[in-house]
Image (cartoon, grey):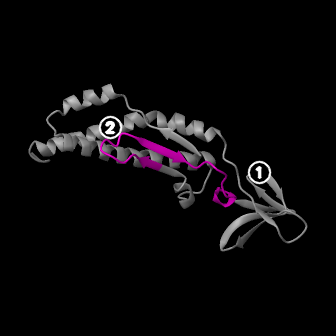
Amino acid sequence: MSLLYMHIDDDVLERMLLQFSALSDKAIRMAYHRAMKRTEITIRKQALNLMRERLGLRPVQRSLKRRVQAYLKPGQDSAELKFWFGLNDLDPLLFKGGVRKAAGGLMIRGTYHEQAFVAVIRGRRGVWRRKGKQRTPLERIRVPIDDEMIVALEDEVFLNLPDIFLRHFETDLRGRSKLAAGGVNG
């Protein structure tokens, strides 16, 4: 699990708001909130693409989408946007190439697992390994995610976060100022 916060310089926001001083406070708050929501969507999409690319996962995995959550602080100012990344171990079946049968077990991403097999247990397909000589107990095999993923997310995605927010905020303010000035076409 990893939590990352967004910080935007107040001076930059003030300079931007001076350009759009004709807008009402309500319009500015609405533009701010919409920019936060758009930033959340953009960052989430970029983070999912980065994780899928770096980990070598199959495209569009629902379980991967649940691993990136964004929380917008409720309230008047909505000034806080927090991201949560679930970086716990993954099921080997999510990776490109999957699993391969080998003598007495399975090969998963170049690692041999003795007495491992693929089976549907309790309605879910998974990779399992026997713990002893008996039929049970079984343990589920998972593939760990490197700690480098946190560094990659911070360096490649969150480095651009303030710029993405400011771009969305300015775009929305421009649209609202055109609308207030006499329509989109006028």
Give x and y (percent) for residue 186. Answer: 9, 45
Residue type at mark 1? Gly
- Amino acid on which disc 2 is placed: Arg
Magenta stretch, main secondary structure, is loop
Residue 10's place in the image compared with 75, above or below, is: above
Residue 115: image quadrant is: bottom right
Q: Is residue 109 left or right of residue 83?
A: right
Q: CA distance from mark 2 to mark 1?
A: 43 Å
Write down the residue under mark 1: 110
The residue drawn where x is 39% and y is 46% is 73
Residue at the (54%, 45%) spot, across then down = 50
From the viewer's perspective, is 146 left or right of 160?
Answer: right
Please tell me whether residue 71 belongs to the stretch shown in magenta: yes
Left or right placement of residue 102 versus residue 171 in this view: right
Question: Residue 167 bears which disc, if any?
Answer: 2
Q: Which residues are magenta?
A: 70-97
First in sequence: mark 2 or mark 1? Answer: 1
Q: Is residue 54 above or below residue 106?
A: above
Residue drawn at (32%, 37%), measured in percent from left and top?
167
Toward which corner of the image does residue 160 lie, by quadrant?
A: top left
In the structure shown, which secondary structural element does the residue marked by tag 2 occupy?
A: helix
